Image (spheres, helix red, strand yellow):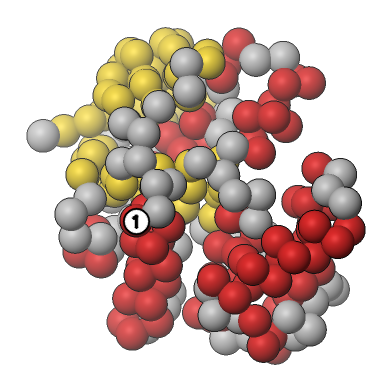
Amino acid sequence: MIRFDRVSKRYPPGVDALSDLSFEVAEREMVVVGGHSGAGKSTLLKLIAAVETATRGTVLVGGQNVSGLARSALPYLRRRIGMVFQDQKLLLDRNAFENVMLPLSIAGFPPREAAQRVRAALDKVGLASREKALPVMLSGGEQQRLAIARAVVNRPSMLLADEPTAHLDNETAADVARIFHEFHDVGVTVLIATYAGDLFPGARRLQLDHGKLVP
């Protein structure tokens, strides 16, 4: 499903975020990407979602070279990918229902079907009773679960998450990790950049050190 072939990413003024990465992730696999702060974990996820473009090498997702996709094709790629950002990127002036509805509205889903999908996603992450709550009314764990609901409302085949359990207490972090395991159990390919790899037992681990894969 995902293949990196000698991929490097350099940012101005000559900072190498990733260097000569080659690996594959199979369909329906769960993979944890570990490494120190600045190791390149976030950049790796952004290359998969075509948020960033590789400086060298090839990134294949579902057989497509994402670096070579036309701008008009990117929305179709991203509908297959749900991404949970480190800073969540929730819209603070919209309630939980409206936050999760946003990607479906952009994609042009019929209102009735979209509403059904939103409520199903909120129910899946345990927020069915909080759909009218603004993000500021939610706890940190609830905000993270809301971000997950928004990421999966399109029913993607792949879920990417950047430090989804950061800044959460142990019990809440374990609860969020359980949600990712549940999506993996139903066939979603899951990649998680995290320091807390112990929350994802059974996942294959990729370890980065200053932008390079290490054993």
In the drawing, does residue 93 fall left or right of residue 64?
right
Q: Position of residue 163 (x, y in %)?
A: 42, 58
Whether residue 32 is situated above or below residue 97 in the rendered picture: above
Q: Position of residue 184 (x, y in %)?
A: 37, 53
Name the quadrant containing residue 166: bottom left
**93 or 109, which lies in front?**
109
Q: Residue at x 43, y 57 (%)?
A: 183
**Disc 1: CA contacts within 10 A as few (<14), some (14-19) or many (>=20):** few
Q: Residue at x 55, y 62 (%)?
A: 148
Q: Position of residue 5 (x, y in %)?
A: 34, 14
If the image is split into quadrants, where does the C terminus sit?
top left
Q: Is residue 213 visible?
A: yes
- All told, the count of numbered labels is 1
Name the quadrant containing residue 79: top right
Name the amino acid, label 1: Asp
Check disc 1 and report its element: helix, strand or loop. helix
**22 or 203, which lies in front?**
203
Q: Is residue 134 visible?
A: no
Q: Residue at x 70, y 61 (%)?
A: 117
Residue at label 1? 185
**213 or 203, which lies in front?**
203
Whether residue 115 is situated above or below residue 135 in the rendered picture: above
**In the current view of this chain or complex, which residue is farthest to the left?**
215
Q: Residue at x 53, y 73 (%)?
A: 125
In the drawing, does residue 93 fall left or right of residue 212?
right
In the drawing, does residue 162 fall left or right of residue 71?
left
In the drawing, does residue 204 fall left or right of residue 51?
left
If the image is split into quadrants, where does the N terminus sit?
top left
Q: Position of residue 82 (x, y in %)?
A: 57, 47
Whether residue 100 is situated above or below residue 204 in the rendered picture: below
Whether residue 153 is situated above or below residue 4 in the rendered picture: below
